[in-house]
Image: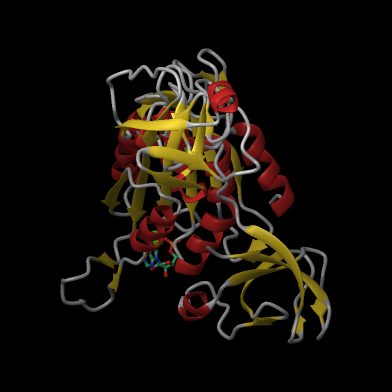
Amino acid sequence: MISVKEAKKIISNNITLLSEKRLPLIESNGKLLREDIYSPIDLPPFNQSSVDGYAFCFDEWKKANKLTIEGEVQAGNTSNTVITNHTAVRIFTGAPIPFGTDTVVMQEKTTEENGILNIDDNTIQKGSNARIKGAELKKGSLAVRKDTLINAASIAFLAGMGIPEVLAIPNPAVSIIITGNELQQIGDDLTSGKIYDSNSFALTAALHKQKIFDINIIYVKDNLDSISEALKKCIEQSDLILLTGGVSVGEYDFVIRASENCGVKNLFHRIKQRPGKPLFFGKKDNSIIFGLPGNPASVLTCFYEYVLPALEKMTGQIHSLKKINSPIMNEFKKAAGLTHFLKGWYDGKVVRILEGQESYKLSSFAQANCLVIIDEDETESTEGDMVELHLLP
Ligand code: AMP
Ligand code: MG
C-alpha cells in the first residue's frame, strides 16, 4: 500500500492535457485556451462617440467660438457623414464620429438657441468623448494569450472581434462502469438481497458539478468477461473511465483482473487511507482508469480526492477541492497507519466531525460541506487543534 501523498503524485505524474480541439466560441467557456489570439480588426473598428451629445471640430470651434447644429448620426449609421466648417452634429453613444470632427461634448454640458450650440464645459479638450479606432486594440495585436482560462469576459472580447471559434482543451468523455450483482435500478421494486445502485448517481452528479456532461454509464455483473468487455469498449471511446465496486480482494472482485486483460498499466492499487483503501489507478493508451471501491462514501471520497485532481491535469481547469485550515471542535482518536478523510461541517470558524463515518453510510456525507484530513501518522486530535479541510463543491 502507498500513502495518500504518493498516490496523488503518481496521478499527477501520469496525466497530461487532453488533445486540443477547435471549439465554437461559446463552448470554450471555462476551458483552457491553447493558442495566442490576435485581433483580426481594430477595436473600436471606427472612431466613435462615447456619449450622447454633439460632435464638432475642436480647432474650428476655438477659432469661431460658434457652432451651427446640423444633422445627426445614430449608432449603427453607415453613411460616413462629412462635416463642413463651424458645424456641430447631434450624435449618440456608439455612433461614428463624422469626418471633419474630432471632439464630442456631452449634451448635459450644452444649450441650444436658434440652431446655435453653446458649449458650457471647461474641461473639454480636443478629442474629448471620442473613442479612437484601434484605441483598445490594433488589428494584428495580441488579444488573449495561450493558456488563459476562458471566461465570460474573454468570450465577449473575442466575440467583439468577430472570432467564431478557438483552439481549447475540451472536457473529457467519461465512462462509468458500475459492477455488482446486487444492484437494482430505481423504479423497480427492491427484491430480497438487492440494493439500489447509488454510485452512478453520485458520480454523474459530481461530474455535472464540474460541468462534465459527456458521460456514458454501463452496468455489468460480477463476471470477469463482462467487466473486461465493458472496459475494453470504454478504453476505445473514453478519456476517463470510472469503475465502481469489485476492486478489493474478494473472489468476486474482478476489476483488477479485467484491467490486466485489457492491458491497462497498473499505476497503483490500494492506498493507506480510510475510506477508499482499495482504490486502483491505471492507464491504457489515452484513457485514464480509476477502479473506485463499491461503498458509496468511498466512491465520493475517492472522486473528490483523486479524480478531481486527475480532471484538473486533463483539462487545465481548476477542479480540485479548496484546502483551508481550521480548529476542530470534537475529539478524534485513531490508530496510526491510515490517513482518514472524515465528513465534517465547517461553519466558517470551526469544523465539527459528523456522526456516521463508515464507508457504507451516506447520511453524514449528505450533510457534510468538507472533508477533514487526519494524517497517516496522527493518532488523536483534541478540541482547538488545527486540521486541514478540503471544502466540498
Ligand atoms: P464491493 O467493493 O463491490 O465489494 O462493494 C462494496 C459495498 O458497496 C457493497 O456493500 C456493495 O453492495 C456496495 N455497492 C457496490 N456498488 C454499489 C452501487 N453502485 N451503489 C450502491 N452500493 C454499492
Ligand atoms: Mg461488488
| Residue 112 seen by the camera | yes
Height in image: 203 above or below 46? below
Residue plotted at (56% across, 73% down): 369
Residue 119: where, in percent of width, then height?
Answer: 53, 41
Residue plotted at (54% across, 41% down): 317
Ligand 1 shown in quarter = bottom left
Residue 226: where, in percent of width, then height?
Answer: 28, 44
Left or right: 205 as drawn, with respect to 286: left
| Residue 151 seen by the camera | no
Height in image: 198 above or below 236? below
Residue plotted at (61% across, 57% down): 321
**How are the colours assigned in the image?**
secondary structure
Of 98 and 117, nearer the camera is 117
Residue 368 picture quarter:
bottom right
Residue plotted at (44% across, 39% down): 117
Of 110 and 295, nearer the camera is 110
Residue 285: where, in percent of width, then height?
Answer: 46, 25
Residue 172 picture quarter:
top left
Residue 27: where, in percent of width, then height?
Answer: 36, 37
Of 252 and 121, nearer the camera is 121
